Every structure is written in C-alpha cells, then in structure tokens.
Amino acid sequence: MTFDLENFLPYRLYQAAEQTSQAFYSYYKERYGLGRSEWRVLFNIGQYGPISAVEISRRSNLEKTKISRAVQKLEEREWLRRVYKSDDRRRHNLELTDDGRKAFEDLVALAATFDAEIRASIGSRSADDLLLKLKYLEASYLMADAD
C-alpha cells in the first residue's frame, strides 16, 4: 500500500494552518514585535478577559510555560495586569491595561483585514463552509477526548 502524504488531510490542515499563521505573524511581528505566543495570549485576554492562565491554556492549546513567558513579556510592556482574587493571592486573572486594549483593537483590525484577504482568495461561501467544517472537526475531537 502506498501512502500519499500530500493528500493526507491532517498533513494538509497542518500545512494550511502553519502557512496562514506565518503570514499573519509577519503583520503583528512588524507592527508590535510580538511573538506567536504573545499574540495568542493577548487575543485570548482581549476576547475573553479577565481570564486565568489555565483558561487561556484550555482555549488556545498553548503550554503553560509559553503562556507564562508571554504574560511576563506583555506585563513588561504594560499591556496586561494581574487581578488577584481577594481570598487567595496565588490565584489571579489577567486583563488588558488601556495600552494593551489599544494594541489589541489595532491588531483586531489587522486580523479582520487578513481574514478578509483569505476569504476573498477562496470565496466567501467556501470560507464559511470551511469554517463550519473546521469547527465540526474541533468539536468532534473534543468530544472524543472527553470519553
């Protein structure tokens, strides 16, 4: 039996994700000097914050050490702050500062432009269909992990 890597769906999904991720990386790297983990942490806090690092890990599939380093770098830029729980100083959530919120909003506009470029290149209907199928794949594998 011959195996055709080029038509192996997980390989194609990975290649497409990596290439589009790298292309978008050039936008936020050039504009703000952010790394990929920093961008993912910033966007999770901007979208869902205040949020814990544990929740960011669950939502983004980032390792806790990468989240910790990204949080440290974003704190150094004064783009986020820790909000401690009054009953336990070891537990905290992360939220954006005013400067962090401004950067996030600027990057949201860049992300929307990038998304529109992808949608234009493959067609709006195809993009919607692809998104629906990707969400289905993600959900079906999440359900399998819960078993």
Image (cartoon, rainbow, N blue to C red):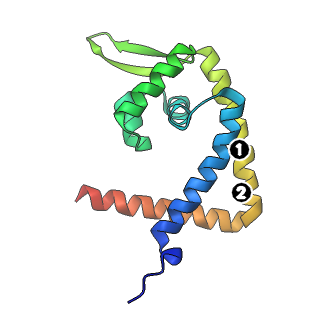
Task: State the SS at label 1.
Answer: helix
As drawn, 37 above or below 32:
below
Q: Label 1 near label 2: C-beta < 8 Å? A: no
User: What crowding class fits label 2: few (fewer than 14 Cα within 10 Å), some (14-19), or many (20 or more)?
Assistant: some
SS at circle 2: helix
Q: Is residue 62 left or right of residue 99?
A: left
| Gap in angstroms between the C-alphas marked 2 and 1 | 10 Å
Residue 115: percent from left, percent from top:
69, 50
First in sequence: mark 2 or mark 1? Answer: 1
Q: Is residue 130 visible?
A: yes
- Residue 123 at least partly seen: no
> Which numbered tag is attached to residue 118?
2
Which residue is located at x 49 percent, y 59 percent?
135
Point out residue 86 in the picture as x, y percentages from the top left corner. 31, 9
Numbered disc in front, either 2 or 1: 2
Q: How many marks?
A: 2
- Give the residue type at disc 1: Ala
Residue at 40% across, 26% down? 68
Image quadrant occupied by the N terminus: bottom left
Task: Please state which of residues 37 and 94 is positioned toward the viewer in this rendering.
Answer: 37
Q: Position of residue 51 (x, y in %)?
A: 42, 27
Residue found at the very far left of the displayed protein: 147
The residue indicated by pointer 1 is: 112
* Image quarter of the C terminus: bottom left
Say which of 80 and 64 sits in front.
Answer: 64
Residue type pointed to by label 2: Ile
Tell me the quarter of the picture where residue 2 sits.
Answer: bottom left
- Determine crowd level at label 1: few under 14, some 14-19, many 20+ residues with C-alpha closer than 10 A: few
Residue at (38, 63) in percent of width and height:
140
Q: Residue furthest front?
A: 2
Could you tell whether 117 is left or right of 85 in the image? right
